[in-house]
Image (cartoon, rainbow, N blue to C red):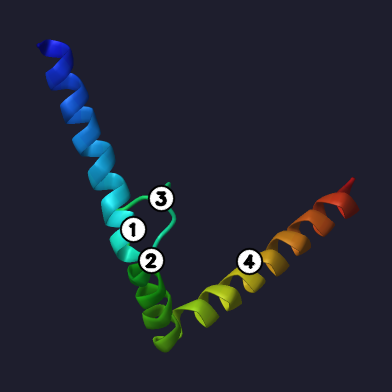
Amino acid sequence: MKLLLIFTLAGFVVGMWFGINIGKGNALYDNPLSDPGIIEEAHDSADDQGLIDQGKEYLDDKKQQVKEKVKNMVDDL
């Protein structure tokens, strides 16, 4: 009786997993709870606010600072 309950519960979970993916038009093995639209919206929002460009500028500035420090350290040796 316990095995019947376990197999029924497992079948229900797997059936829900596949059913949601089929309903969304995703591959059967994809995560049915993931929402790729959220990632795209976050990227678009950050791009609209200029955060991506600011981040690139910040990283370029830091890269130049590190290069200068390393060059100075090598020159001191």
Report the amino acid beneath label 4: Lys
User: If you read the primary sequence from the N terminus, does the residue marked by circle 3 or circle 2 appear first?
Assistant: 3
Q: Position of residue 37 (x, y in %)?
A: 35, 71
Q: Position of residue 38 (x, y in %)?
A: 33, 69
Q: CA distance from mark 4 to mark 1?
A: 47 Å
For residue 15, side relative to residue 54 (left or right):
left
* Residue at the image position 89 percent from the left and 54 percent from the top: 75
Q: Amino acid at mark 3?
A: Leu
Q: Of the residues under marks 3 and 1, which one precedes in the sequence?
A: 1
Q: Quadrant of the rendered structure where residue 46 is?
A: bottom left
Mark identifier at residue 61: none
- CA–CA distance between discs 3 and 2? 16 Å
Query: Dot 2, crowdedness within 10 Å: few (<14), some or many (≥20)?
Result: few
Badge 1 density bin: few <14, some 14–19, many ≥20, Cα 10 Å: few
Nearest the eye: 77 or 35: 35
46 vs 4, nearest the viewer: 4
Left or right: 2 in relation to 64: left
Instruction: Give the amino acid at mark 1.
Output: Ile
Q: Nearer the viewer, residue 21 or 8?
A: 8
N-term-proximal mark, 1 vs 2: 1
Q: Which residue is mark 4?
A: 62
> Which quadrant of the rendered structure holds the C terminus?
top right
Comes first in the chain, label 2 or label 4: 2
Q: Give the number of the mark in front: 1 or 2.
A: 1
From the image, state whether disc 2 or disc 4 is nearer to you.
Answer: 2
Residue 28 percent coordinates (x, y): 41, 50
Which residue is tagged 2?
36
CB atoms of marks 3 and 1 within 8 Å: yes
